[in-house]
Image (tube, helix red, strand yellow):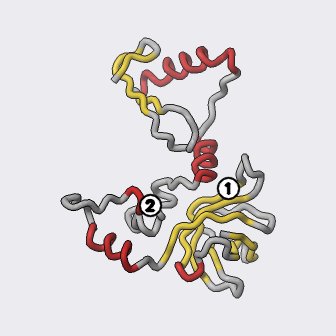
Amino acid sequence: MIDFAGIKNVIMSCTGYTGAGGFEIYMPNNDGPAIMKAVMDAGAEFGIKPIGLAARDTLRLEMGFCLYGNDINDTTSPIEAGLGWITKFAEGNNFINRPAIEKQKTEGVKKMLRGFQLIDKGIPRQHYEICDKEGNLIGEVTSGTMSPSLKIPIGMGYIATEHAAIGSEIYIKVRDKLLRAEI
Protein backbone atom coordinates (compact mmCIF):
# COMPACT_ATOMS: atom_id res chain seq x y z
CA MET A 1 0.00 0.00 0.00
CA ILE A 2 1.22 3.45 -0.88
CA ASP A 3 0.09 7.06 -0.69
CA PHE A 4 -0.75 8.22 -4.22
CA ALA A 5 -2.07 11.61 -5.31
CA GLY A 6 -2.79 12.47 -1.69
CA ILE A 7 -4.83 9.30 -1.17
CA LYS A 8 -3.70 6.80 1.47
CA ASN A 9 -3.69 3.01 1.14
CA VAL A 10 -3.61 2.77 -2.65
CA ILE A 11 -2.36 -0.43 -4.27
CA MET A 12 -0.34 -0.18 -7.48
CA SER A 13 0.64 -3.16 -9.54
CA CYS A 14 2.18 -3.85 -12.91
CA THR A 15 0.68 -7.08 -14.17
CA GLY A 16 1.55 -6.42 -17.81
CA TYR A 17 -1.95 -7.61 -18.63
CA THR A 18 -2.09 -5.87 -21.99
CA GLY A 19 1.45 -6.84 -22.96
CA ALA A 20 2.51 -3.22 -22.67
CA GLY A 21 4.04 -1.10 -19.94
CA GLY A 22 1.57 0.35 -17.51
CA PHE A 23 0.10 0.08 -14.05
CA GLU A 24 -3.13 -0.83 -12.37
CA ILE A 25 -4.29 1.37 -9.50
CA TYR A 26 -6.62 -0.01 -6.83
CA MET A 27 -8.47 2.26 -4.43
CA PRO A 28 -11.85 2.61 -2.75
CA ASN A 29 -14.51 3.71 -5.27
CA ASN A 30 -14.99 7.10 -3.64
CA ASP A 31 -11.28 7.93 -4.21
CA GLY A 32 -11.45 7.10 -7.93
CA PRO A 33 -12.35 10.58 -9.21
CA ALA A 34 -9.50 12.29 -7.28
CA ILE A 35 -6.95 9.73 -8.48
CA MET A 36 -8.21 9.98 -12.08
CA LYS A 37 -7.89 13.77 -11.96
CA ALA A 38 -4.36 13.55 -10.55
CA VAL A 39 -3.27 11.10 -13.27
CA MET A 40 -4.83 13.18 -16.05
CA ASP A 41 -3.29 16.40 -14.68
CA ALA A 42 0.16 14.77 -14.42
CA GLY A 43 -0.04 13.53 -18.01
CA ALA A 44 -1.64 16.62 -19.57
CA GLU A 45 1.63 17.90 -21.05
CA PHE A 46 2.03 14.54 -22.85
CA GLY A 47 -1.49 14.53 -24.25
CA ILE A 48 -2.64 11.67 -22.02
CA LYS A 49 -6.15 10.44 -22.73
CA PRO A 50 -8.32 7.92 -20.85
CA ILE A 51 -9.16 4.64 -22.53
CA GLY A 52 -11.58 1.91 -21.63
CA LEU A 53 -11.95 -1.83 -21.60
CA ALA A 54 -12.15 -2.10 -25.39
CA ALA A 55 -8.55 -0.86 -25.65
CA ARG A 56 -7.46 -3.33 -22.98
CA ASP A 57 -9.28 -6.09 -24.81
CA THR A 58 -7.71 -5.41 -28.22
CA LEU A 59 -4.22 -5.10 -26.74
CA ARG A 60 -4.42 -8.33 -24.77
CA LEU A 61 -5.90 -10.15 -27.79
CA GLU A 62 -3.06 -8.94 -30.03
CA MET A 63 -0.64 -10.36 -27.47
CA GLY A 64 -2.56 -13.64 -27.26
CA PHE A 65 -3.39 -13.14 -23.59
CA CYS A 66 -6.43 -14.93 -22.19
CA LEU A 67 -9.31 -13.11 -20.55
CA TYR A 68 -11.09 -15.02 -17.80
CA GLY A 69 -14.72 -15.48 -18.76
CA ASN A 70 -13.92 -15.37 -22.48
CA ASP A 71 -10.88 -17.51 -23.23
CA ILE A 72 -10.53 -19.39 -19.96
CA ASN A 73 -13.10 -20.36 -17.35
CA ASP A 74 -13.91 -23.19 -14.96
CA THR A 75 -14.65 -25.56 -17.87
CA THR A 76 -11.25 -25.15 -19.58
CA SER A 77 -7.87 -26.33 -18.40
CA PRO A 78 -4.55 -24.50 -18.55
CA ILE A 79 -3.29 -27.21 -20.93
CA GLU A 80 -6.17 -26.64 -23.37
CA ALA A 81 -5.56 -22.89 -23.13
CA GLY A 82 -1.84 -23.23 -23.90
CA LEU A 83 -0.96 -22.15 -20.38
CA GLY A 84 0.96 -25.25 -19.37
CA TRP A 85 4.04 -23.10 -18.92
CA ILE A 86 2.46 -21.50 -15.83
CA THR A 87 1.19 -24.81 -14.44
CA LYS A 88 3.82 -26.03 -12.00
CA PHE A 89 3.84 -29.79 -11.51
CA ALA A 90 6.68 -29.75 -8.96
CA GLU A 91 6.51 -32.36 -6.22
CA GLY A 92 4.33 -31.21 -3.34
CA ASN A 93 2.52 -28.67 -5.50
CA ASN A 94 -0.96 -30.18 -5.11
CA PHE A 95 -3.37 -27.85 -6.87
CA ILE A 96 -7.06 -28.47 -7.65
CA ASN A 97 -7.66 -31.12 -10.32
CA ARG A 98 -3.94 -31.86 -10.66
CA PRO A 99 -4.37 -35.54 -11.72
CA ALA A 100 -6.67 -34.66 -14.62
CA ILE A 101 -4.51 -31.75 -15.78
CA GLU A 102 -1.37 -33.86 -15.51
CA LYS A 103 -3.08 -36.51 -17.65
CA GLN A 104 -3.89 -33.88 -20.28
CA LYS A 105 -0.27 -32.76 -20.28
CA THR A 106 1.00 -36.28 -20.96
CA GLU A 107 -1.82 -37.65 -23.16
CA GLY A 108 -2.96 -34.51 -24.98
CA VAL A 109 -6.23 -32.62 -25.16
CA LYS A 110 -9.33 -32.74 -27.36
CA LYS A 111 -9.45 -29.00 -27.97
CA MET A 112 -6.86 -26.23 -28.04
CA LEU A 113 -7.04 -22.46 -27.78
CA ARG A 114 -5.63 -20.96 -30.96
CA GLY A 115 -5.19 -17.50 -32.35
CA PHE A 116 -6.29 -16.83 -35.90
CA GLN A 117 -6.58 -14.08 -38.46
CA LEU A 118 -9.51 -13.68 -40.79
CA ILE A 119 -8.62 -13.75 -44.48
CA ASP A 120 -12.10 -12.86 -45.72
CA LYS A 121 -13.78 -9.58 -44.78
CA GLY A 122 -15.59 -9.67 -41.44
CA ILE A 123 -15.08 -9.47 -37.69
CA PRO A 124 -14.98 -12.61 -35.52
CA ARG A 125 -17.02 -12.34 -32.31
CA GLN A 126 -17.35 -14.42 -29.16
CA HIS A 127 -19.50 -17.56 -29.61
CA TYR A 128 -19.26 -17.60 -33.41
CA GLU A 129 -18.82 -21.13 -34.70
CA ILE A 130 -15.48 -22.31 -36.06
CA CYS A 131 -15.95 -24.79 -38.91
CA ASP A 132 -13.96 -26.87 -41.33
CA LYS A 133 -14.16 -26.35 -45.10
CA GLU A 134 -17.33 -28.47 -45.32
CA GLY A 135 -19.06 -26.42 -42.61
CA ASN A 136 -18.69 -29.01 -39.85
CA LEU A 137 -18.45 -27.51 -36.37
CA ILE A 138 -14.89 -27.84 -35.01
CA GLY A 139 -14.79 -25.10 -32.38
CA GLU A 140 -15.98 -21.76 -31.05
CA VAL A 141 -14.58 -18.23 -31.05
CA THR A 142 -13.83 -16.96 -27.56
CA SER A 143 -12.59 -13.46 -28.47
CA GLY A 144 -12.37 -11.46 -31.68
CA THR A 145 -11.87 -7.93 -32.96
CA MET A 146 -10.28 -5.76 -35.61
CA SER A 147 -6.63 -5.48 -34.61
CA PRO A 148 -5.70 -1.80 -34.32
CA SER A 149 -1.99 -2.56 -34.76
CA LEU A 150 -2.21 -5.12 -37.56
CA LYS A 151 -5.28 -3.64 -39.29
CA ILE A 152 -6.74 -7.12 -39.80
CA PRO A 153 -9.51 -9.06 -38.03
CA ILE A 154 -8.10 -11.43 -35.39
CA GLY A 155 -9.49 -13.78 -32.81
CA MET A 156 -8.97 -16.73 -30.52
CA GLY A 157 -11.05 -19.81 -30.05
CA TYR A 158 -11.08 -23.42 -28.97
CA ILE A 159 -10.59 -25.76 -31.90
CA ALA A 160 -10.68 -29.55 -32.04
CA THR A 161 -7.05 -30.66 -31.78
CA GLU A 162 -7.01 -32.46 -35.14
CA HIS A 163 -7.82 -29.11 -36.83
CA ALA A 164 -5.58 -26.89 -34.66
CA ALA A 165 -2.20 -27.01 -36.42
CA ILE A 166 -0.50 -23.65 -36.93
CA GLY A 167 -1.10 -22.45 -40.50
CA SER A 168 -4.32 -24.46 -40.89
CA GLU A 169 -7.23 -22.96 -42.76
CA ILE A 170 -10.42 -22.72 -40.71
CA TYR A 171 -13.74 -20.98 -41.26
CA ILE A 172 -15.63 -18.63 -38.99
CA LYS A 173 -19.40 -18.79 -39.39
CA VAL A 174 -20.86 -15.29 -39.58
CA ARG A 175 -24.59 -15.02 -40.32
CA ASP A 176 -24.61 -18.44 -42.01
CA LYS A 177 -21.62 -17.53 -44.20
CA LEU A 178 -18.25 -19.25 -43.81
CA LEU A 179 -15.36 -16.77 -43.73
CA ARG A 180 -11.84 -18.06 -44.32
CA ALA A 181 -9.31 -17.71 -41.53
CA GLU A 182 -5.83 -19.01 -40.77
CA ILE A 183 -4.52 -20.27 -37.45
Q: Residue at x 61, y 63 (%)?
A: 115
Cβ atoms at labels 1 and 2 below 8 Å apart: no
Q: What type is the residue that disc 2 sits on? A: Leu
Residue topped by disc 2: 83
Q: Tell me where residue 28 sits by quadrant.
A: top left
Q: Residues within 10 Å of mark 1 (few under 14, many from 20)?
A: many
Q: What type is the residue that disc 1 sits on? A: Thr
Q: Give left or right: position of 117 versus 63.
A: right
Q: Give left or right: position of 77 versus 124.
A: left
Instruction: Out of 180 and 107, give the one closest to the viewer.
Output: 107
The disc at residue 95 is none
The disc at residue 145 is 1
- Quarter of the picture holding the C terminus: bottom right
Q: Nearer the viewer, mark 1 or mark 2?
A: 2
User: Does any portion of residue 28 appear in the rendered image?
Assistant: no
Q: Residue at x 63, y 34 (%)?
A: 51
Q: Measuring from the top left, give residue 172's x and y in whole percent.
A: 68, 72
